Amino acid sequence: MRRPRPAPALVAAALVLTSCTSVSGDEPAAAPTTPSAPSSEAPSASPTAGGEADDVPEALAEYYGQEVAWASCGETFECAEITVPLDYDDPGGESITLAAKRLLASGEKQGSLVINPGGPGSSGIELAEAAPSYFTAELRDAYDVVGLDPRGVGDSTPVDCVSDAELDRLRAAEYDLETDEGLRAYQADAQLIADGCASTSGDLVANVDTVSAARDLDVLRHVLGEDELDYLGFSYGTYLGATYAELFPERVGRLVLDGAMDPSLSAHETTLAQAVGFESSLRAYAEDCLAGPDCPLSGSVDDAVGQVRTLLELTGDTPLPTADGRELTASLAFSGIIAPLYDDSTWFALTAALDQAINEGDGSQLLFLADLLAGREADGSYPVNTTEANWAVNCLDYPVEGDLARWKAEADELEAAAPTFGPIMGYGAVLCDAWPAQDRAEREPVTAAGAPPIMVVGTTGDPATPYEWSVALADQLESGVLLTYDGGGHTAYGRSNDCVNAAVDGFLLEGVVPEEGTTC
């Protein structure tokens, strides 16, 4: 009998495509930093005109021509707000604001490098704040590193759908989708989310699609005073960057897309590839764990993976107690297990958490890892809206296909392909089927015809954005060039090796395009 499947909230929260998940097995991470209030120092105004490549529609002239005041918000940072139309099809209507933060170049400035950490729903501002420890000194010396919270995210005009307490409940919830009662409860919670988004966020939920976010990038490029967009996007940020290149190939500068998504895949194809990717990552973890001295798993790799699967099944029947006072359900255990699989340097945290859960019957560390992935603080608050923004963007970017009968067949396919994670990753279309706005995107290849060389970086053992997606995107792009990192974990730049960092820096700083077939 198939175990209960978690809520749609879990799938969105657990499979956030971000490159910057920090995991510690013993203490909570620091709360995300909120940009400081601008100082009383005189703000610096951005140029109000971009380069000769601009051909701005008259209806958007006020947005492209706005004067943006950058004010000090830290010793080496400046912050600003940028105004963009809520709906680019109605630029004379309502507007929204985008929050940006830039780390000023420490040397002679070459230009502005816009960055995106993924998600969808992750904060570019937080990535900019992490830039001193994430990007090379050479890159930071030459570029203002500019982080933007995309529309609907974080400090920009945000999507809001449910209360923090309700999000706690949804993340922990489970449903037996083999029964009519369980299916009705699942659909009711999906409708609750959709209704909450519509009532709290209004028309914003219909306008946080990736095409709109890419058009925002062009407004940002212009108000930064840049002729072309230099950009470094991770994970979902590769889809955002590729979409920009498709819309504005003549304004593409040096684009690096690390941990690529394949724009042509459907929602089910994407989920299936991820389920298989995380299943493979779990097997790699199990092999590494079994070779160490303090592994809570035993036997062969198959045996060890089976023990993890058994833990998930047991928590589905009897949730584990935690020091937090909440119970570790199978949904939360799934999130806690999957979080360290993004980066092999954090596998130690999974070992400690599994040891505590299996040998002590205590789910505290797995719960901590699950909360870290979802952005939940110890006091029960969610300072970031990553999960809600993730719902909103994905439900616009992926057309809903089929009906319950098809979704059941797809869920069965997921379980067969990935026995540990597949059963928990099905039926995601139920939420988007209830979504209060129509999806906008068509899933099709992106070519960016006429753009200069675009670097795509793929990691052979990436669980969240499988290597085949990077190969596919590099092939789709008319000027795509693939750099391969032979290793594990999600994305490569800033976390893999000097070879990758040097190749990316060489491209961004000097325009050096790697030779075809380059592997680090």
Image (tube, helix red, strand yellow):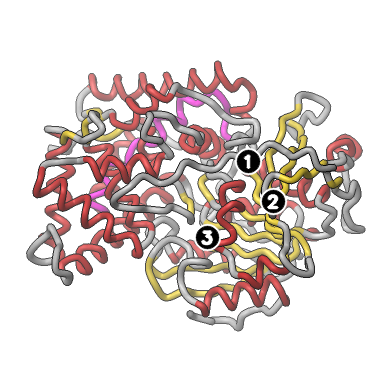
Q: Nearer the viewer, mark 3 or mark 2?
A: 2
**Few, some or many C-alpha atoms within 10 Å of disc 3 (few <14, some 14-19, many ≥20)?**
many
The magenta stretch spans residue 124: no
Measure the alpha-carbon separation of dots 3 and 2.
29 Å
Quick check: can you spot residue 146?
yes
Place residue 97 in its image quadrant: top right
Q: Which mark is residue 260?
A: 3
Whether residue 429 appears in magenta in the rendering, the answer is yes
- Can residue 478 be seen here? no
Q: Residue at x 53, y 50 (%)?
A: 118
Ranked by sequence position, the earlier of labels 3 and 2 is: 2
88 lies left or right of 400? right
- Residue 401: x and y in percent read 45, 37
Specify which label sits upstream in the sequence, 3 or 1.
Answer: 1
Residue 25 spot, x, y in % from top left: 29, 52
Residue in the picture at 12% in, 32% down: 318
Residue shown at 75% from the left, 59% from the top: 112
* Above or below: residue 357 compared with residue 1: below
- Amino acid type at circle 2 is Phe
Q: Are marks 3 and 2 in contact (CB under 8 Å)?
A: no
> Which three-letter amino acid code belongs to the residue tagged 1?
Pro
C-alpha gap between disc 1 and disc 2 = 9 Å
Q: Residues within 10 Å of mark 1 (few under 14, many from 20)?
A: many
Inter-mark Cα distance, 3 to 1: 29 Å
Which residue type carries mark 3? Ala
Q: Quadrant of the N terminus?
A: top left
Q: Which residues are magenta?
A: 418-439
Mark 1 secondary-structure assignment: loop
Q: Which residue is mark 2?
A: 77
Which tag, 1 or 2, sits closer to the chain's start? 1
Query: Residue at 55% across / 20% down in the picture?
Result: 198
Q: Which residue is mark 1?
A: 35
